[in-house]
Amino acid sequence: MYMNFFKLKENNTTVKTEVIAGITTFMTMAYILAVNPDILSATGMDKGALFTATALAAAFGTLCMAVFANYPFALAPGMGLNAFFAFSVVLGMGISWEVALTAVFIEGLIFLIMSLFNVREAIFDAIPTNLKHAVGAGIGLFIAFIGFQNANIVIKDNATKVAMFDINKMNMLFEGAQFNFNNVGITVVLTIVGVLVTGILIAKNIKGSVLWGILITYGLGLISELVGLYVPYIEGGLYSLIPNFSNGLAIPSIAPIFFKFDFSQILTPQFFTIVFAFLFVDVFDTLGTLIGVSSKAGFLNKEGKLPKVKGALLADAVATTVGAALGTSTTTTYVESASGVSEGGKTGLTAVVVAVLFTVSLLLSPIFLAIPAFATAPALIVVGFYMIGSINKIDFSEAGEGIPAFLAIAGMAFTYSISDGIVFGVVSYVIINLLTANFKKLNFMLIVVAVLFLGKFFAETIFVQFTIAVIVIATIIYYVFFKNKK
């Protein structure tokens, strides 16, 4: 029956091939089970509940992809989007994680509507190609910076803002702290080793390099604790690395974060900006991943379009909405799906295997929850390496294209905000090309987006709030009811 449903013969594949492809994809992206709870728990969310939410969101989203589109693509809470959620929105803007989850939920509903009409293509086509690549590169730099900070390789400094790791400086920054080599020092060394090990594995094309890098770093940490080289320092946030199996293989309760929405800020301009930033990154990340992996798999037709793209986007939108209800940041299609495709995966059966493995992983929560920040930091740094590669596709030879792209990348890293970097890029692009009379580069949707972003900085007045609401409603009505009929 499943052979007919997934059309294995029509796609010239077998059950064995699809299963191997599914295992390969899972191995390359299972690191999210350790990284996502680690990042989002910085907001005060329960780490155990986050682990469960991450596994369930990944399993559900991937299963949706199998059913809606019959593609071998896997989904999980997205890297970059989780960092934006935790460090830009919650910690940076002072928004509660409940409000942030609400923004993700609303973004998912909007994406769902966009998947049924052509609004997503309108926004995607409106943003210049160079800015699209800049967003990916900027997020890569942002994620790598978080990795360096989580590992304490880069620390705060009163004079230079940031500095290289120094035990004396850390003790000066935290009054009464007793950091030394046997607590924080050894973790910095282990992170550096982890980055090098992961890099070597990637260079040797080892499947699941990022996950293996995390596990090896964690294993070295365990050995260090057992021989006394690493001594937990709870006051400094450095805990024991030994898994706690006192509750057996019980699955952590999702109750602390399940359906914890707060709609009190939904009508504020700041909330709209957050929703749009989530939506912006999600749309481009999803479409970019689908196009890239589909190209590798040979799914694109002669016109370069992806058949059943509406089903794939619908799966992504539904997964984001359900993921928010479960208590995690935006769920999106993973570029790591390409690893399974390279092993011959061609149908949704590959995705089903990935979904099953994510579900089974719930029983391994004590291990994943014991993995510390210094062990997941190499994964963040390496993922940053993968993402910043899109900078090679940016045309810096023309100032009107290159400067906005540069501002977007630099803005994300230096303002510690993905959304601010996007604002820098879009607004500067419109202003530079408007004042240099390059009107052919501009379009209605891009100008609308730039105006909305500018409104972010003047959104305290009722007039600006009203104007933003009118622009948003008018734009949606135009593209849903008029543009689609042309």
Image: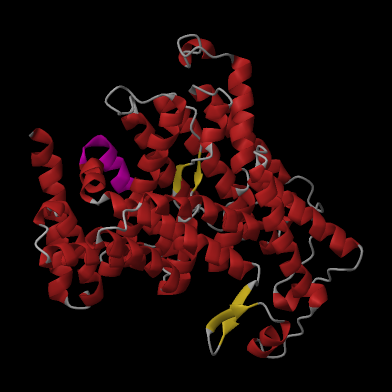
Residue at figure coordinates x 32%, y 58% from the top left? 396
Look at the picture and state if 175 lies above or below 95. below
- Where in the figure is residue 285, as x and y percent of width and height? 39, 47
Residue at figure coordinates x 74%, y 74% from the top left? 184
Between 359 and 429, the one lying in front of the other is 429
- Where in the figure is residue 376, as x and y percent of width and height? 65, 57
Between 139 and 237, the one lying in front of the other is 139
Look at the picture and state if 385 lies above or below 93. above
Check the picture and name the quadrant holding the C terminus: top left
Judge whether residue 247 can be spotted in this image: yes
Residue at figure coordinates x 64%, y 25% from the top left? 20
Between 260 and 107, the one lying in front of the other is 107
Its colouring scheme is secondary structure
Would residue 217 be counted in the magenta stretch? no
Judge whether residue 106 can be spotted in this image: no
Between 50 and 471, the one lying in front of the other is 471
Quarter of image, res 333: top left
* Left or right: residue 105 compared with residue 30: left
**Residue extending furthest toward the right:** 227
Q: Which residues are magenta?
A: 108-118
* Left or right: residue 29 compared with residue 416: right
Look at the picture and state if 406 lies above or below 158. above
- Count of numbered circles on the image: 0
Residue at figure coordinates x 12%, y 47% from the top left? 477
Quarter of image, res 289: top left
- Where in the figure is residue 271, as x and y percent of width and height? 31, 65
- Where in the figure is residue 108, as x and y percent of width and height? 36, 47
Q: What predominant SS class does the magenta segment belong to?
A: helix
